[in-house]
């Protein structure tokens, strides 16, 4: 076992994102393999698993089997809650029907170009989607997580500065979104940007929980994670082996922050509860089989 902290209780929320690892993978991962991988991850002790998405199978063919995958998951005995990504009201209407899903995650990009590429909607239309999906979530007892995608800059030349990120975060707080994750979709953030945004938002809006979804490389993950921790962030996304990224953003997947690197760092700081090391090793073994 990984060294114990306060048993079962953690100051931080660790979100494992196999959906982000799988969604842009170059060949279709068979449904049975997805189920096997997710069932292993469910035993590790992550707080949340971002397991799939209810989006267009033309846009993201890899996730076309999310409903079947869900049917194969063994949730009994797992502490992990499930999150699924949705990108329009239709996807949300489907996701809320599943009792097993606790969180719906909506990517709201502060870069208009990416929002159009990713969700076929303008910023104004997306804001309406946020409001409609929030209403659905409240009605069905789900929690909406808003990802502020391209939160630290974008590769398209769309106007960007930190004020734009802060503005959209405030708009989400006004709409009573409880969890807002600052997403560095293509890995552009500097540690200074991460610190400034989180320190400002955490101080300004105590009613919301701010997280980070920081795509990064093995060379720059640690300083960004450290910056987020120092700023008081308590919700972190990652993916085992640092695999993945958004195929709607650019052709080359930038990689996720590698959860296997994050775990020891968070535990060293007594921020993370005990995990099941055997299940973690089994998950890594299956990942090595699947992601080839
Ligand atoms: C959002 C839509 C669906 C367009 O949404 P739309 O504009 O409302 O769609 P539409 O009504 O114009 O329909 C377009 C086509 O999609 C189909 N369709 C429409 N809705 C659905 C649905 N819910 N489920 C299944 N099919 C659907 C619909 O049937 C139609 O099919 P066609 O007639 O062309 O055959 C599309 O643009 C889409 O699926 N985009 C993919 C979004 C996505 O999954 N992106 C990756 C995940 S987000 C991410 O990775 C970022 C994140 C979270 O990690 C954080 C970060 O790093 O930034």
Image: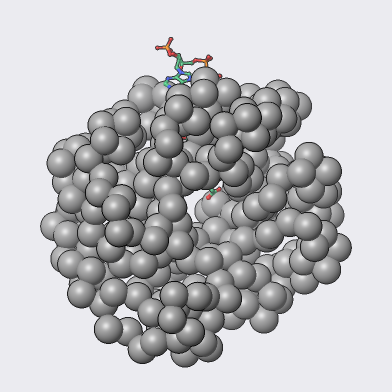
Residue sitting nearer the eye, 106 or 27? 106
| Percent position of residue 149, x then y | 61, 47
| Percent position of residue 75, x then y | 31, 50
Q: Is residue 97 above or below residue 271?
A: above
Horizontally, is 152 left or right of 202 in the view?
A: left
Picture quarter with the N terminus: bottom left
Horizontally, is 218 left or right of 222 in the view?
A: left
Residue 231, image quadrant:
bottom right
Q: Is residue 267 above or below residue 206?
A: below
Picture quarter with the C terminus: bottom left
| Percent position of residue 98, x then y | 42, 32
What sort of colour scheme is used for the picture? one colour
Horizontally, is 61 left or right of 109 in the view?
A: left
Residue 267, image quadrant:
bottom left
* Rendered residue at 29%/53% (across/down): 76
| Percent position of residue 32, x then y | 15, 41
Residue sitting nearer the eye, 147 or 138? 138
Residue sitting nearer the eye, 8 or 144? 8
């Amino acid at each position: 076992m990984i060294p114990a902290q306060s048993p079962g209780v953690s100051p931080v929320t660790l979100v494992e994102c196999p959906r982000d690892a799988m969604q842009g993978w170059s060949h279709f991962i068979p449904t049975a393999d997805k189920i096997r991988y997710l069932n292993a991850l469910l035993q590790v002790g992550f707080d949340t698993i971002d397991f799939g998405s209810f989006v267009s199978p033309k846009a993201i063919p890899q996730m076309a089997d999310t409903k079947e995958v869900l049917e194969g998951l063994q949730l009994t005995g797992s502490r992990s809650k499930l999150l699924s990504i949705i990108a329009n009201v239709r996807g949300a209407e489907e996701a809320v029907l599943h009792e097993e899903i606790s969180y719906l995650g909506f990517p709201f990009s502060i870069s208009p170009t990416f929002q159009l590429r990713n969700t076929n909607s303008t910023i104004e239309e997306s804001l309406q989607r946020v409001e409609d999906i929030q209403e659905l979530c409240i009605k069905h007892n789900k929690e909406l997580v808003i990802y502020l995608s391209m939160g630290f800059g974008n590769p398209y030349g769309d106007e960007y500065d930190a004020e734009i990120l802060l503005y959209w975060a405030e708009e989400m707080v006004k709409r009573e979104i409880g969890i807002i994750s600052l997403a560095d979709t293509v890995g552009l953030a500097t540690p200074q940007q991460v610190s400034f945004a989180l320190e400002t938002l955490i101080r300004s809006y105590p009613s919301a929980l701010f997280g980070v979804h920081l795509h990064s490389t093995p060379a720059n993950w640690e300083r960004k994670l450290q910056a987020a921790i120092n700023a008081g962030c308590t919700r972190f996304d990652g993916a085992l082996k640092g695999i993945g990224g958004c195929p709607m953003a650019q052709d080359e997947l930038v990689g996720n922050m590698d959860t296997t690197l994050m775990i020891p760092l968070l535990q060293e700081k007594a921020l993370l509860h005990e995990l099941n090391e055997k299940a973690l090793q089994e998950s890594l073994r299956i990942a090595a089989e699947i992601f080839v």
